[in-house]
Image: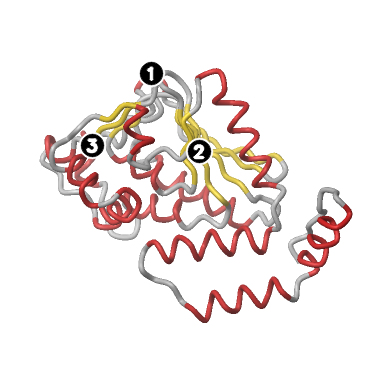
Amino acid sequence: MTPELRIAGTIATITLQRPTAANKLAPEDLPVLRAHVAAVNASEQVLVLQLRSTGKHFCAGYDIAEVGGSQAEGTGFGDMVDALEDCRAVTVAVLHGGIYGGATDMALACDFRIGSPAVEMFMPAARLGLHFYASGMQRYVTRLGVDVAKRLFLAGDKLDAGAMQACGFLTHLVSADELEPQTQALCERLGTMAPLALLGMKRHLNQMARGQMDAQSVRAAVLQTLASSDLQEGALAWKEKRAPRFTGR
């Protein structure tokens, strides 16, 4: 089955649904995933997007039998992952099991990666004879550092959950029993933030990570929040010691 999208209030969820094949991605999944991200971008009420999967493994990456067509310009695997990174909403990858190959880049494209001790990862590109695409390698270098990127891409090191947290791949490592409640708590907390500030800072932090900061765009976003009713509501709620009621205006 192709990935499924569900939206419930401020939280959207994309679920990979091929558990018998370790949620391996096929060519037909790429446009579906991009369409799901586009639907989230078009839904003003959505502030958080979860990326999940079913079964034992999180995702085994892209089907190696189909890899020859995976880099078609504009519609390839890397373009899908870039679209995920540029998603309007704050993204959370919920990792409950093994994550391999291109799926590791999908998770890196997310703003948060929360995993349990059962998680492990490796990148078999060199073992398979595949040169990875540029934006994926850039994500590895900017988020994990060039030395970690070389361990994974060149040496093909396998990392367990502890090593994944130590190198920065996992932003949160929790027990298996706590994976769902901790994910829910994180997503709910994100969903209570002021939309203009939350989504603006997410966008600009990612641009800074890529060395693409536009100072004028950042300043415009700052001035927009200074003039917003949400800032007034946030200050009043803080003074009154209550939860703010933001409108995104």
- Count residues near mark 1 (Cα–Cα under 10 Å), then give few for <14, some for 14-19, many for 20+: few
Decide if residue 132 is on the left or right side of residue 20.
Answer: left
Badge 1 element:
helix
> Front-most of 53 and 190?
190
Note whether 110 is above or below 207 in the view shown: above
Categorize mark 2 by other alpha carbons within 10 Å: few (<14), some (14-19), many (20+): many
The residue at the point 38 percent across, 35 percent down is: 165
- At horizontal 22% and vertical 34% (from top left) the residue drawn is 64
Outermost residue toward the right in this view: 240
Instruction: Between label 1 and label 2, give the one nearer the viewer.
Output: 2
Q: Earlier in the sequence, mark 1 or mark 3?
A: 1
Disc 1 + disc 2, Cβ < 8 Å: no
Which residue in the protein does label 3 denote?
A: 123
Please name the residue that numbered disc 2 is placed on.
51
Q: Amino acid at mark 3?
A: Met
- Residue indicated by mark 1: 20
Amino acid type assigned to the residue bearing label 2 in the image? Leu
CA gap between label 1 and label 2 equals 18 Å
